[in-house]
Amino acid sequence: MPGDLKGGAFAIGNFDGVHRGHQAVIDAARQSRKSPLGVLLFAPHPRRYFQPDKPLPCLTDLRAKLCLLERLGVDIAVVAPFDARMATRSAECFVREVLVEQLCARHVAVGYDFAFGNKRQGDAQTLQRLAGQNGIDIDIVKPVVANAKPCSSTRIREALHLGDLAGAADMLGHQWGMGGQVVYGDGRGRKLGFPTANIPLEDSALGEAFALPFGIYAAWVFIETTASSKAYRAALNIGWRPMFETRRPLLEAHLLGFDGNLYGRRLWVFPMAFLRGEEKFGSLGALRRQMRLDCLDARKRLGETSGPPGL
């Protein structure tokens, strides 16, 4: 740690989704008025270390997570590798080596359900006791409730799995989205008159099990690294493309009103409304007619606003 970044207030957690509960933890660290305001997070997600064979559809990859943290005014994000050394540290060792010796933290904020140390031997109260012995102030943040239950990454994953984008956004405090790099496809969309930007889902770093049901969505799309912050309305296909029997699922975005080359560019995609499920049509003509209707429906669903709310 550079010397000028030591000695601040740190919020600690996985911050998958950077949802309203995470935001409350960061706010608690901010209210300590210790500077700089930092976040300590872990990569990969601990569950991927302990259960590598069990798919985990993360809500945000590291890049998106850091962008969201920056928007919240965080000065520094410390990304700690979650490996065997981290997993087997005792609670006492974690506090001494990480919080005291490396971060020189003066204030720490965690959620009510925080657990740490070898075999999760420590909880928030353990942290409060150990940190207090080392002169570190601790805030234990109560749950943030939505629909009578605490906001959690697990609940948000469940909402997305059901296609409940509005419910997920309510718990997140912002619209859920994902980023990815555009790759070359087979050009079928362009031949049909609806060119698409293709992003392989396995390259999205969100996990092996994608969060949303496959189908057609109305979405907002941002093109990263452009000077303009313009958002494009899009008709979005997520899935296998049953007409063409693809071997891997894709995210395909047809940007309405855009004419240009997106190969190699990174997009941020925010699905806003489910339009219909995947379907195999009897002819390319029938598919083309449906794609035209999908674009009209997407434009109607997204309205005349200039971009997704909460971004």
Image: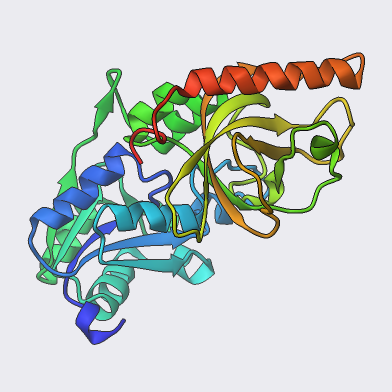
The correct choice, above or below, for 231 with respect to 216 in the image is below
Query: Which image quarter holds the N terminus?
Result: bottom left
Q: Is residue 169 left or right of residue 100?
A: right
Determine the residue positioned at 63% across, 37% down: 210
Residue under the image location 19 percent in, 37 percent down: 142
Inspect this view and state whether residue 209 appears.
yes
- Residue 149 vs residue 308: left or right? left
Q: In the rendered view, tell whether residue 104 sits above or below residue 234.
A: below
Residue at the far right: name it: 283
Which image quadrant is residue 248 in?
A: top right
Q: Position of residue 303 (x, y in %)?
A: 44, 22
Label count reads 0
Q: Position of residue 16 (x, y in %)?
A: 43, 46
- Residue at 89%, 31% (x, y): give it: 244
Location of residue 46 in the rendering, given as x and y in whole percent from the top left corner = 49, 54
Question: In the rendered image, is residue 277 in sight?
Answer: no
Residue drawn at (36%, 41%) of the image: 311
Q: Is residue 174 left or right of residue 100?
A: right
User: x and y percent of residue 270 in the render?
Assistant: 50, 37
Q: Which is nearer the eye, 164 or 274? A: 274
Kindly give the residue lying farthest to the bottom in the view shown. 3
Which color scheme is applied? rainbow
Looking at the picture, tell me which residue is in the foreground, 198 or 156: 198
Frontmost residue, 185 versus 60: 185
